[in-house]
Image (cartoon, rainbow, N blue to C red):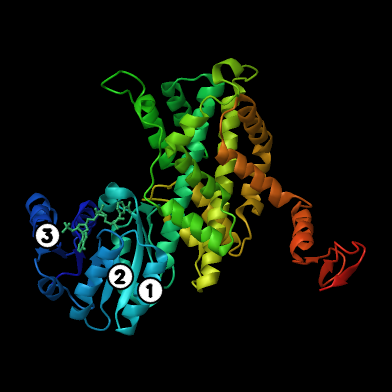
């Protein structure tokens, strides 16, 4: 046994993670259900480092130094359970199974509890950055026991992305905490992408800019506070011309966004925990709406402004306004996502450090952005911050942006350009800052039809009004 770590599941993600480990000088045992992938890896990349190819589960386990560290990088779902069932009987107490696939955090909690019974550590680990990240430095979010991180942490920190010399990897918290945080990361990613897409649609619809021109606008934005991987790649996608037709690439792509389901998980969990992650929900529904071709076909002729005719009264300043609306909406999306992590952490007793989460998202992952350094700073200054929107820097930035934000949303409404992301973010901002909400009326309605009772602003207790008989009769319930 001479490998410091092993990877089973050598499709694109596992292969690149194994190569990354080997390139950093670690001896990596290799295993895959079908042996061809193992052979291919060694044939193509064997010279990159020290690999120990194995073809049976027993061989794989024997190749590992104790405590054994097995990274499972297989298709998420039942394959993960199958692999665990295959390897767990061959392991000894203290060994560590790392699930680096995209598991649902509830599955991770279940698996962790079952393996803990058998004396094994199970570390559900969020890995973000796609195949490039896996090879060159991903953002890594391990859950599981703190003691497993003692031996695993140094390896993962070694291969993670680095920002200012700091690794984008930290122990997130026990059992499913890592996969939970990865889930919210993906939800925020949906939201970020939707907001950027709406910005594109606005610049095109309201200013008549061509995609290549909009690419330049995004490149400029990318030198400021919006500096991020997603803005950068958006500029490249928009500047790209379809080789077959010579048309802008974005115009030849079918406008039906797909999803693998992590956005849906995030929204479902937001509903379960009662956290209003409206930005993520709208972004997820926007993808779903785009795919409903039959609905869209049926509604296509409905009256409303046509973009070219309605344009006008929009100044060149509009592009700058969109930048501000994008920034403010993005703050809202992140504020909501971090609140969800806060709520998950409280619900499951994880004690997640939100500043540390922001720090590991600064590099390697899809939502990496300069902005995350500011979020880290905000939670460093106040760990229990109720909302990012109320924190000094973000508060003043959003307050400064709000006139432009409102103007962009009203222009969008006037021109009939759908901006669910911008609109819901602004509605969230206005709802949070409101002195009174019409929720009071909703309570009245609930009391009327269902005797659900209400609380009063001026007295403690819960009250019910006997509506049918005599609305003046109120009594404490
Ligand atoms: P896939 O999700 O396509 O899974 C293929 C791998 O799973 C192969 O090694 C395959 O083995 C193995 N596998 C499938 N079923 C079983 C089974 N029943 N028993 C044993 N092995 C099985 O591979 P990817 O590399 O794309 O992704 C791996 C994981 O990483 C997934 O969980 C995915 O969600 C996640 N992922 C993460 C990304 C990220 O950015 N973080 C990006 C992409 C994926 P065989 O060769 O024998 O068929």
Q: Where is residue 179 in the image (x, y as percent from the top left)?
A: 40, 63
For image coordinates 20% across by 60% down, the residue present is: 9
Gap between marks 3 and 2 measured at Cα? 27 Å
Q: Nearer the viewer, mark 1 or mark 2?
A: 1
Q: In which quarter of the image is the C terminus?
A: bottom right
The CA distance from mark 1 to mark 3 is 27 Å
Residue 203 on image: x %, y %: 52, 25
Q: Is residue 115 shown left or right of residue 36?
A: right
Q: Which of marks 1 and 3 is nearer the N terminus?
A: 3
Q: Mark 3 points at which residue?
A: 34
Is residue 181 in view? yes
**Splitting the image into four quadrants, where does ligand 1 fall?**
bottom left
* Labels 3 & 2 near each other (Cβ < 8 A): no
Judged from the image, the secondary structure of the residue bearing numbered disc 2 is helix
Q: Pointer 3: residues within 10 angstroms few (<14), some, or many (20+)?
A: few
Could you say which disc has been placed on residue 152 in the image? 2
Most foreground residue, 123 or 153: 123
């Amino acid at each position: 046994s001479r490998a410091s770590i092993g990877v089973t599941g050598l499709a694109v993600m596992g292969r690149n993670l194994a190569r990354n480990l080997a390139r950093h000088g670690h001896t990596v045992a290799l295993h895959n259900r079908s042996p061809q992938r193992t052979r291919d890896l060694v044939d193509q990349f064997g010279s990159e480092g020290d690999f120990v190819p194995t073809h049976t589960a027993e061989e794989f386990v024997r190749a590992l130094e104790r405590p054994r560290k097995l990274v499972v990088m297989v298709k998420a779902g039942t394959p993960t359970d199958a692999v665990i069932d295959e390897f767990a009987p061959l392991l000894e107490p203290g060994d560590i199974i790392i699930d680096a696939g995209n598991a649902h955090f509830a599955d991770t909690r279940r698996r962790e509890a079952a393996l803990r019974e058998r004396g094994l550590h199970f570390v559900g680990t969020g890995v973000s950055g796609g195949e490039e990240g896996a090879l060159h430095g991903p953002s890594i979010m391990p859950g599981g026991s703190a003691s497993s991180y003692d031996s695993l942490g140094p390896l993962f920190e070694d291969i993670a992305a680095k920002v200012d010399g700091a690794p984008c990897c930290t122990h997130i918290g026990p059992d499913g905490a890592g996969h939970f945080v990865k889930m919210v990361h993906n939800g925020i990613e949906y939201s970020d992408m939707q907001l950027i897409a709406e910005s594109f649609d606005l610049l095109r619809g309201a200013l008549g800019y061509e995609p290549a021109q909009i690419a330049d606008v995004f490149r400029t934005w990318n030198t400021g506070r919006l500096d991020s991987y997603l803005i950068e790649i958006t500029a490249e996608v928009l500047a790209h011309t379809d080789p077959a037709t010579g048309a802008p690439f974005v115009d030849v792509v079918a406008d039906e966004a797909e999803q693998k389901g992590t956005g849906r998980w995030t929204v479902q969990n937001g509903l379960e925990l009662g956290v209003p992650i409206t930005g993520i929900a709208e972004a997820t529904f926007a993808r779903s709406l785009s795919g409903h071709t039959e609905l869209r076909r049926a509604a296509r002729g409905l009256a409303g402004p046509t973009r070219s005719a309605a344009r006008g009264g929009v100044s060149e300043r509009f592009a700058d306004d969109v930048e501000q609306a994008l920034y403010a909406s993005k703050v809202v999306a992140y504020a909501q996502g971090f609140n969800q992590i806060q709520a998950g952490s409280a619900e499951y007793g994880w004690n997640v450090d939100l500043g540390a989460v922001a720090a590991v998202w600064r590099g390697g992952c899809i939502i990496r952005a300069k902005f995350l350094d500011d979020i880290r700073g905000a939670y460093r200054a106040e760990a229990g911050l109720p909302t990012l929107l109320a924190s000094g820097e973000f508060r003043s930035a959003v307050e400064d942006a709000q006139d432009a934000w409102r103007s962009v949303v009203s222009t969008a409404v006037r021109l009939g350009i759908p901006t669910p992301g911008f609109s819901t973010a602004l509605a969230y901002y206005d709802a949070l800052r409101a002195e009174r909400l019409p929720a009071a009326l909703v309570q009245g309605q609930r009391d009327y039809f269902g005797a659900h009772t209400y609380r009063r602003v001026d007295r403690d207790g819960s009250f019910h009004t006997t509506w049918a008989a005599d609305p003046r009769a109120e009594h404490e319930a």
